[in-house]
Image (spheres, rainbow, N blue to C red):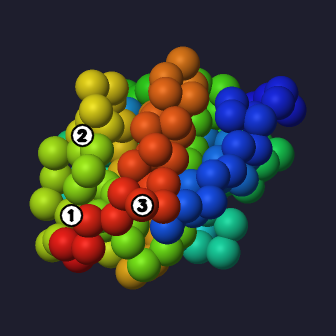
Amino acid sequence: MSDHATPLAQARSDGYVTVAEDAPRDMIQLKGDLSDPGLADAVERIAHAAMPGPLGLSTSDSAWIAWMAPDELLISLARGQGADALSSLSRAMGDRHHLALDVSDMRAAIRLEGAAVREILAKVAPIDAVTLPVNTVRRTRVAQVPAALWLSGPRTAHVICFRSVGRYVFDLLSLSARRGGEIGAF
């Protein structure tokens, strides 16, 4: 887990929705049998959060676990906790079939704040932003690049994408949230 500069240099754009790089986090991608009680126990111990169900997101004070696919989770921890968590996870999994990777430096994380976050998501992603439940993860695309997104509350949305397209996604979200571009459909 790295101490390098953040992917977006703490970028922020204030429009009718605020778009800002989220606080730096350590992230672990875990692939394995999500129905394995040993895997669930190991994940819950490092994140102090319940194992999410399909499309779900579970949170604790310092971590979150996102269900990304039937055999994949993304575990996000406070900066500096990832290396120990990865080591603990590997020990707990032992010989069980799994793949656990530090993906902290591969991702850019963007946070949207404001009453119209659903409108911004609807502008850029092919999802039903009207009915998207809070803490439901969607793997989709933002314009033409892959991303994962979710709402953590009625006024807060999160987008995670590859670092290499992070500036593009940030700029697209910022343009969509610029004052004067309100649609008012939500």
Circle 1 sits on which residue? 129
What residue does disc 3 label? 180
Q: Is residue 42 left or right of residue 130?
A: right
Residue furthest out toward the front: 180
The answer to whether residue 32 is seen in the rendering is: no
Q: Secondary structure at mark 2?
A: strand
Type of amino acid under label 2: Thr
Report how far apart the C-alphas of labels 3 and 2 lie in the structure: 27 Å
Q: Residue at x 33, y 26 (%)?
A: 145
- In the shown orientation, is residue 25 left or right of residue 181? right
- Type of the residue with mark 3: Gly
Q: Which residue is mark 2?
A: 140
In the orientation shown, which residue stands out farthest toward the right?
A: 3
Disc 1 element: loop
- Residue 28 in percent (x, y) is at 56, 38
Q: Amino acid at mark 1?
A: Ala
Determine contact: label 1, label 3, CB under 8 Å: no
